[in-house]
Image (cartoon, coloured by chain):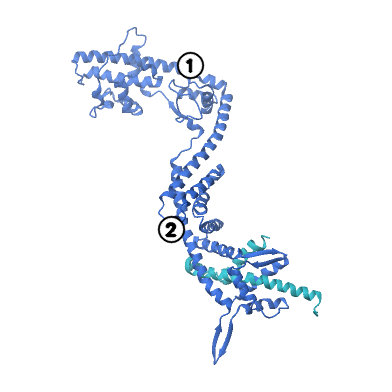
Amino acid sequence: MLSNSSVVIGTNLAEICVDRNLQLIPKKLTLLDELTAAVSNNLFTTVSNRELIEPAIIAASSGIESERKGIKSYIQSSHDTIMDNYIVDLANLVTNYISFARNVVNKEVNLLKESLETALANYRYKEPEDFFNVKYYKLHEVYNSYLVENEISSYKDSSSKYFFESMNLNKITEESFDLAKYILTGDEEQDLLIQDWFSSIGKNRAISFIIENIPEYSLSTDALLDYSLVNYLFYRNLVEKSDIDLGLTTVQLRTKATSNRDYFGNKLNVALELYRKDIRNGKILSSSSETSFSYFNINPLNITVYEESFAKLAEGGGNIEVLFGFIVTNNTNDVTVDHLLENKEDYQQKWMNIRSLYMIFLNNNRLNIFKQILREVFENSLNKTEISEEEQSFLNENPGFIDETKRLGNEYIDQLHISDINDLDTITLDLVAKIRYRFTNAYFILKEMKENLALSNDMEPLEAALFATVKYVTDYLCEQVDVVRL
Amino acid sequence: MSDLTIEEQQNLFKIKKIIDNSIVLSNILELATSIIIRIAGKDIADNIKNQSLNRTVLSNLVANRIKEKIINRE
C-alpha cells in the first residue's frame, strides 16, 4: 500500500511533469513496472477531479479491510505483496553496498593516501635555490690571535727555504690519541680560540690534513688556512714534547718536526697573505667554489662566499641573487664585488630569467615525478593488499582484472595535470573506488559522502552515508523509468 | 458520443496523465523511502533514526533527487 505522504508528493511532482509535457513510463520487466502495474490494474474508478487523484491511487494500492464478528482482518493487495518481497531484499543489498564501500573500499583509499603521502614526503623537489649550496666563510678569530700574529708573522719576508719531512703519523688516528687536546698551547685565552676553531673544522678533517698527502695547490685559500694551521700547531707541540713514538730518535724526531713546523708556519703565512689579498681585491668566491651550472646537475654547486666581501656587496645594494646571476652566466668563480655591483641589475635579471625558465622545467619535472611515485604506490597497493574472500573469488573469475586495473590506473595517472596533484583525496578516491573497485557502487557512495561532508563541518560520516544512500536508491529506481516528452 | 465539453475532456485527459505519472513517482517515493528507513535502522545509525528523520522528511529528500534526475534533466 502506498502511504499518503508518498502519493501526495508523487502527485505534486506528477503535475509538474504534465505541465512540462513529460510522460513517465516504467521500463519493461523492471521492479517499478511491476509495482506500477499492480496499482494501475486495480484503478477501477474514473477520476474526474484533481482532489480525488490521491485517494484513488491509495485505494488502488491497498488491500481489503474487513471485519467479521468484531475481528478486523486485512487481505494484502498485489502491490503490498510485491512491496513486502522487495523492500527486505533491496535494503539488505544496499546495506551490503554501503558496508563494503565504507569498510573495505574507503579503508583502501586511506591506505593508498597514506602510502602516497609517505612516498612524496621522502622525495624532495629541487627548488631553483637548491642549485647552490652556499657556505659563508669568515676568517676565524684564531687567525688574529696572539700566537698567529707573533709566531706566524716571523715567517714573513723570510728568505729561508722550507722543506716538508715525510713522517708516518698513523698513530694519531688511534682512538686514544686526542688531537684536539694535543694542539693546545697551554695559554687559556689562546686555547679557547683553538678549541672553537677546531670544532668548526672537525676532528676527521683535521686528522686527514695531517696524515694524508694532500696536493696543496688544489686547496682553496680557506682550506689552505685550516690545513696549514692544524699542521703548524701539531708540529709545534711535537717539537716541544717529542712524546709520540714514531720509531725515531728524539733528535731525529725534533729535527723533522721542526722542519715541518716551519714549513707549515710559512705556508700559513702565505695562506693568510692570499686571503687578505683576496679581500683587498674584493674577491667574493673562494677558488674552490663550483660554478658549472646546469639544470640537470644532480648535486648542488658548492660555493664558498667570503663573508667580508659579501658584506661589501650588500652595502652596495647587491644580494646573493646577483651572485647566482653571475655564476649561471659566466660559469667561473673569478669575480669581484666591484664587478657585481657595476652589473647588479643585469645579473639579478639574468638569475630571474633562469629561475623562471627553471620553474617551468621544474613544474614539468615535478608532475612527472609525482606520476611516477603515484604509479609505483598504486601498483604496490594492488599487489600487497590483503583481500577478502569475495574479492578473491571475483578475481578468480576475472583473471585479467588486475592487469586491466593497472592499465586504467596508468591511463588515469597519465592525464593528471600539475593543478591536480595537490588534491590527493580525489586522486586516491578515483584510483581505488572508481578504477580498482569499478565492479562495485563504492565510488558513487564514497564520492557523495565526501561531497556531503564538505558541505558542513558538523556532519557525521554516518549522516553523510545516509544522504548518499538516498541518492543511490533514488537513482537506482529512476533508471527504471523512460521519460518521454509529449 | 460524450456529453463532455472539450474543456472537460481536456481536464479528464490531464487528470489521467497526472495519475499515470503519479503512480510511477509514488512508487519510487514509497519504495526508496521504505528501503532507506529500513537501512537507517540497520546500518546507518540509530542516532539518525532518533532525529527528525521521519518518512515525510525522507520522502522530500527523495523527491528532490527525483526532480534532479527526471524533471530538471529534461
Q: Name the residue under label 1.
A: A281
Q: Horizontal placement of A342 versus A290: left or right?
A: right
A33 or A188, which is in the foreground? A33
Label 2 resides on the chain identified as A
Q: Name the residue under label 2.
A: A393
Q: What element carries label 1?
A: loop
Q: The blue chain is which one?
A: A
Question: In screen coordinates, is A235 left or right of A430?
Answer: left
Label 2 Cα crowd, 10 Å radius (few <14 / some 14-19 / many 20+)? few
From this viewpoint, is residue A144 visible?
no
Mark 1 belongs to which subunit?
Answer: A
Mark 2 belongs to which amino acid? Ser
State the residue in front, A431 or A204.
A431
Say whether residue A138 is visible: yes
Where residue A95 appears, as percent x and y from the top left, is 49, 65
Mark 1: amino acid: Asn
Q: Where is residue A323 in the image (x, y as percent from the top left)?
A: 51, 25
Look at discs 1 and 2 and give the one toward the viewer.
2
Which mark is drawn over residue A209?
Answer: none
Tell me what residue is drawn at x 26 percent, y 26 percent.
A173
> Quadrant where the C terminus of chain A lies?
bottom right
